Amino acid sequence: MYQVKEFDQQGLHFFRLSDNASYVDICPERGGIVTGFHADGEDILFMNEETLFDTSKNVRGGIPVLFPIAGQLTDKTYEWNGAVYHMDNHGLARTRPWQVIRSAADDDQAAVKISFHSTEETRESYPFDFEVVLTYTLADGQLTIGQTISNLSNDAMPVYPGYHPYFNIKNQKLHIKSKAATYLDYNDHQIKPFDGGIDMHGLKESVVLLNSGDPQLEFDFDSSKKVVIKQDARYKYTVLWVEGNQPFVCVEPWTALTNTFNEDKSKALMVKQGEPLELAIDIYLEER
């Protein structure tokens, strides 16, 4: 039997989706973030709790939600329809509270649905009215994240969302099963051949697998298990990032490259009024 429980910790409110063998923790007020995912006896995600509970800091860990953009903008600015706007790295959603719509559990799954809406404040950075709904579901040791992006404005709305999962992986020599043939190395801005392996040791900047559109990514979690990410084909890019010798590796599904609003707006996904954009990813462990 699955359950949904609520609990408070150090001033933050959490939802826990669980069964006897697995659980997912979500903190709506910290950007709608997944803060923990335990399955198959493993803590799948890394979390720096100091950054989670210090609300003045960006959370280092879990699965931050990147909306309406993934990545950075040159000078944190972009132009749209002749006006210049300022937006912080990875957009608006990860630093603002989300509202809980409902939660439920039965014999097959547990789920919580949360939403993020435009406000006068968000319109100063992003001149659109919108609603984003995330549905987090735990079933059979698998985390599913469903995302619905609705445009409440008259004009088509550009987005290139993503996720920033911090996996609890110690080995920075990555072996990834992907259709990508090349990757862009932001350390020297060169496009390089990809043969399934990348050594991330000592890399200050990220690298990104190009135009893979993988329906399924697989990479080693440890010596006996692998992480599987099933995803919508519109996640064309997989960003890889480490931070020094910290015990995590970020493997991030993105829909466009960093700075797309400045370099090539045509690469953004356009959401029309009355035609919501639906995206989904699944994350779970498997035996290698």
Image (cartoon, rainbow, N blue to C red):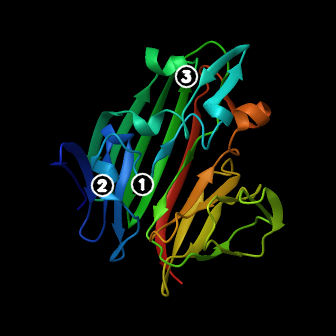
Identify residue for label 2.
50
Percent coordinates x, y for residue 39 in the rendering? 35, 70
Percent coordinates x, y for residue 274 in the rendering? 59, 21
Question: Mark 1 or mark 2, which is nearer the start of the sequence?
Answer: 2
Q: What is the quadrant of residue 219 in the picture?
A: bottom right
Residue 60: mark: 1
Q: Are dots 1 and 3 in contact, CB under 8 Å?
A: no
Secondary structure of the residue carrying numbered label 3: helix
What amino acid does circle 1 point to? Answer: Arg
Identify residue for label 3.
125
17 shown above or below 129:
below
Distance of label 1 from label 3 (alpha carbons):
23 Å
Say whether residue 60 is left or right of residue 231.
left
Distance of label 3 from label 2 (alpha carbons):
28 Å
Secondary structure of the residue carrying numbered label 1: loop
Question: Mark 3 or mark 1, which is nearer the start of the sequence?
Answer: 1
